[in-house]
Each structure stands twice: as C-alpha cells, then as structure tokens.
Image (cartoon, rainbow, N blue to C red):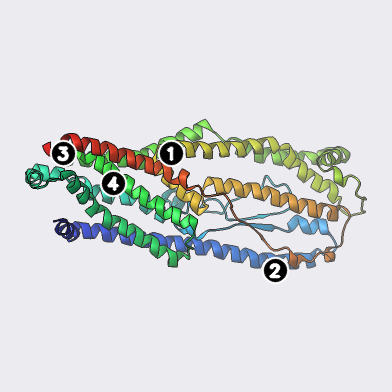
Amino acid sequence: MISLAFKQFIRTGGVRIGLSFLLIAGIASLLVGRQFVLRQNQAIADVQAFQQKDFVQKAALHHDDLGLLLYYLKFSLINETSPLAGLSIGQRDVNASVQSVTIRALEGQKYDADLNNPLNLLLGNLDFSFVLIYLFPLLIIAFTYNLISEERESGTWKLVAVQSQKLFTVVLQLFAIRALPLLGVLLVILLLAIPILGISFDTAFVVLVATSVLYGLFWFSVSFWVASQKQTSAVSAMLLLGIWLSLVILLPALINTYLENRYPVPEALATTLKQRKGYHEKWDLDKKTTLEAFYTHYPQFRKLPTAVMETDWRWYYAMQQLGDDESARESGELRAKLQQRDNASRVIAQFVPTLHTQLQLNELARTGLGNQLRFLDHTTRFHEKLRLYFYPKIFTNAPVKAERWTDFPEETFSDSEPIRPAIILGPLLLFTALLATLGWRNYRKTLYSL
C-alpha cells in the first residue's frame, strides 16, 4: 500500500514540477556560489601579483626616502574564503575579503569596502542558503497542507481508519513519502556542491549538511502539527503560509529593527571624524607636544637617535598615530556595539529556527558578522606589527635598499573559531521534537475522529 502511495505521489505532475524546480534552483545557487568564490580567489590572486610588482616599482622610485615610500605602500591582509562561502555568502558581498592598509592611521582604513551596486545588495544573492531557507519550506507546505484534510473532506479517511489497525503509522508513512523525495533533492544538491565548489568533506561541511536536513525536518514537524489540528485544507494552507511569512520574513525584519535601535552605531561616523580631526589638528600644534604624546604610547622609540631627514617623518607618523589614539574610545565602542549585536542576534535566533539556521550557515561558511569582527581584530594586530617593524627604520632613516621588498608577501587570516555542533543543531532538534510531540498528542486524541 505504501509503495503504491509513493508511486502515485511521485508520478503526480505537480510534484515532479516542484522537485525539478527545486533541483534547478539548487544547482543555480551552486553556480552563483561558484562564481562568487572564483571572483574572491581572482581578487586575491590579483592582489598577490600587484603587491609583488608594486613594492619593487615604488622602492625603485623612492629609493632614497623610506618614510615617503611607506607613505604609499599598501600591505594586504586576506580574509580566507572557505569553499563553503559558495553555499552561504552572508556578509561577504558587503565586507571586502582583502584589506590593504598603509602604516598610516588605521581607523580610516579598517572599514573600507568594495564598491557595489546598491540594487544588487538589496536583492541579495541566490545562494544555497536562500534556496534552503525560503524555497524548501514552500514546497514542503505545498506537499503536506492537505495531507489528511483532503482525505477527510472527500470521505475516504473513514475507510482508511476502518481498514488500518495502526492509523498513526499510516500518517507517519504519508509524511515520510513526501519527506524522502524532498530530503533526497536536498542531499543531491549538497553532494553536487562538493565537486562544483571544491568542498572538503570536513567537520564544517558535515555539520552544515546536518543543519540543512534538520531545517527541512523542522518544517515537516510544523506541517505535522498543523495537520493534527483537524482543520480544513484551506485553513491549514493559510496557517502554514502565515507561519512561513512570520518565521522567514516578519520576525527577522522585526528582530533586525530591534537590534538596530537597541545597539545603534553612531560611533562608525564618530570614529572616522575623530581620527581625521585628531590627525589634522596636529599640523597646528607644537611638534614637541605631538612627539611627547607619541612617546607616551611608544616609550621604546624615545631613545632612538634622531636622523637628519628632509621631511620630519617621526613627527608625521606621530600625528598619524595620535589620530588613531584619539579615536580609540569611539573605535572601542563601535567594536563593542557590533559584538553586542552579534551576541544578541545569536541568543534571539535560538527561538527563531529560520534566523538561527541562516546565522549558523554563515558561521560555518565564515561569512557572518562574527568572522568580520575577528578579521578586523586581526587587521589591527597586523597593522600594529607593521608599525613596530618599520617605525625604527623610518626614524633612523634606514636605507630603502636594505629591505628585501619581495619578502613582504600578503598575510592570510584563517578563522579558527571552533565549531560547536550542540549549539548549532540543538535549537532545531528541540523545536522539531516539540512540534512532533504536540502533533502526536493531538493525533492520539482526534485521529480516529478525523
């Protein structure tokens, strides 16, 4: 009987069209992701080639002035792009994966981003996470909204109830008939992602697959619970669509609005203005005052011998440094607000499975806000390392030719944030089990009266 029901279901024209559409959308999302990853890798390759060429050319041009040379040189820091980023692009389409900085004031450089078409950013990307979070639930709703109500409305459910001794098992089998093809399409898409995106079969990918499957099962549990409410097909469809709109669109929008108002970031503008003001004001101040403030930050440079230079680079880079120092409070507040937003969104998302799934996919792919904050922290450490290395050489007017400029390759930031499967999978498991249990209790009370 079940095999016949499965064949009847899979041979339905609408089912075939729906599954085909979902498979095509999934493959298209993989191609979009592949194009994105290739574009990121090409940008990294271009930066690598440019830096090697640019350093040698500028060193030859400014061969007698190290301070002037380092005014222009940009050192590149790369935020490693995981192949999983092709599945969940997250914020990587807004935040640059390559940060090129000079040793001048940092705060004015940290938040530089690539130029993008605002309309494209508004529309977003058709990546796998979009297909999973938005499209899969719609097909699950279409396949299950009238699973039992249609039989009851047509009068055939009483015949099934009379002929079956385990009616609840029949209900589970009917849901399984619809779950297997959909989850099969999901797994096919993820298996195709391995060769298309060059994904390694590692812990991150396994957890991502588990998250995707659990998300699908969550929506089946939603349909299972709604079907147990003894409603008509029309009411069940409206209820399921209302849940989809609430979880996918309405609640995420409300949460985002709440977070923006709860943790506003005016410090983003204040940091830039304070850094620029802190630097430009020093042109009108006494040099000794500026240098004393600089030596307070870097006392190890006070005893360096003063070299005779056409340009007083010690004073100039001291001004640049003090621009960062005077904007440090605003910069710290901005960093703290962004971290608070990230932490709050993770806590709230535990109660909204759709939002939780999106955030965790981004975290696994290293494309979320958490990754960007860690990258900015590494940018600060990278910039400080450059300053500590070059300041003594600039201040003592070391010869340009003494440096091997080809020995300054770009640095790569590899995000080592640990993966916590329990935190990622726990909320989805909990909601799936809760709805399945509530549905089971309803079926126990009303199944034979349906």
Name the mark on residue 447.
3
Left or right? Give the position of 33 relative to 378. left
Q: Residue at x 80, y 48 (%)?
A: 317
How far apart are the alpha carbons under marks 1 and 3?
A: 32 Å
Q: Secondary structure at mark 1?
A: loop
| Residue contact at pointers 2 and 4, CB within 8 angstroms | no
Looking at the rendered structure, the kind of residue marked 3 is Leu
In primary-sequence order, the first of circles 2 and 4 is 2
Q: Residues within 10 Å of mark 1 (few under 14, many from 20)?
A: many
Left or right? Give the position of 60 relative to 308. left
User: In front: mark 2 or mark 4?
Assistant: 4
Report which residue position mark 1 lands on. 350
| Residue nearest the viewer, comparing 278 with 167 | 167
Query: Percent from the top left, x then y, of residue 160?
Result: 9, 47
Report which residue position mark 2 lands on. 53
Q: Secondary structure at mark 2?
A: helix
Report which residue position mark 4 lands on. 220
| Residue contact at pointers 2 and 1, CB within 8 angstroms | no
How far apart are the alpha carbons under marks 2 and 1?
A: 49 Å
Looking at the rendered structure, the kind of residue marked 4 is Phe
How far apart are the alpha carbons under marks 3 and 4?
A: 18 Å
| Quarter of the C terminus within the rendering | top left
Quadrant assignment, res 1: bottom left
In primary-sequence order, the first of circles 3 and 4 is 4
Name the mark on residue 404.
none
In primary-sequence order, the first of circles 2 and 3 is 2
User: In front: mark 2 or mark 3?
Assistant: 3
In primary-sequence order, the first of circles 4 and 1 is 4
Looking at the rendered structure, the kind of residue marked 1 is Gln
Looking at the rendered structure, the kind of residue marked 2 is Lys
